[in-house]
């Protein structure tokens, strides 16, 4: 941008049309308009991790309940899931257990 550019920041995420017209001593001409509306997009970032600690409860011989608190920051985009993984104590590798919707903050391993 140069010194002849005016900055404007829209406040809402709504559709905008734009137009520009020239003006001289004789007056203002009909504007040139955008044909399609434009929606400003928010910069989306990664969400923050779930809030810890991870809480383990109802621990049985072959089952347990895992719980956490929701992420504090969704990165300006609604969360779509939490992925639950389990680490193998023998080789240290992580493997997928399940994926749950973002409204769920606990999981029962059976």
Image (tube, helix red, strand yellow):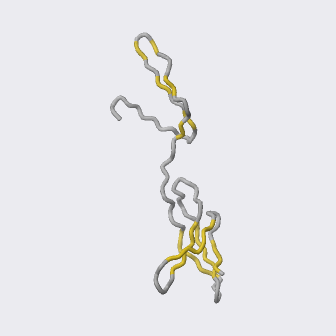
Toward the bottom, the furthest residue is 61
Name which residue lies at 46% across and 15% down. Answer: 28
- In this rendering, the answer to whether 14 lies above or below 98 is above
Q: Nearer the viewer, residue 24 or 55?
A: 24
Q: Quadrant of the C terminus?
A: bottom right
Q: Nearer the viewer, residue 75 or 72?
A: 75
Among the 4 quarters of the image, the one containing residue 5: top left
* Percent of width and height locating residue 25: 40, 11
Is 25 displayed left or right of 39 in the figure?
left
The number of callouts visible is 0
* Percent of width and height locating residue 57: 63, 81
Toward the left, the furthest residue is 3
Q: Nearer the viewer, residue 34 or 28?
A: 34
Name which residue lies at 56% across and 69% down. Answer: 83
Name which residue lies at 47% across and 25% down. Answer: 20
- In this rendering, the answer to whether 14 lies above or below 18 is below
* Percent of width and height locating residue 84: 57, 72
* Percent of width and height locating residue 105: 62, 69
Name which residue lies at 48% across and 55% down. Answer: 45
Q: Quadrant of the N terminus?
A: top left
């Amino acid at each position: 941008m140069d010194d002849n550019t005016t900055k404007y920041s829209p406040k809402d995420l709504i559709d905008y049309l734009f137009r520009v017209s020239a003006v001289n001593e004789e007056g203002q001409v009909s504007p040139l308009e955008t044909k399609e509306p434009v929606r400003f997009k928010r910069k989306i970032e990664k969400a923050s991790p779930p809030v810890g600690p991870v809480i383990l409860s109802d621990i049985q011989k072959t089952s347990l309940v895992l719980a956490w608190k929701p992420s504090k920051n969704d990165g300006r985009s609604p969360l779509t899931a939490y992925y639950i993984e389990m680490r193998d104590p023998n080789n240290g590798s992580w493997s997928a257990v399940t994926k749950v919707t973002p409204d769920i903050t606990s999981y029962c391993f059976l």
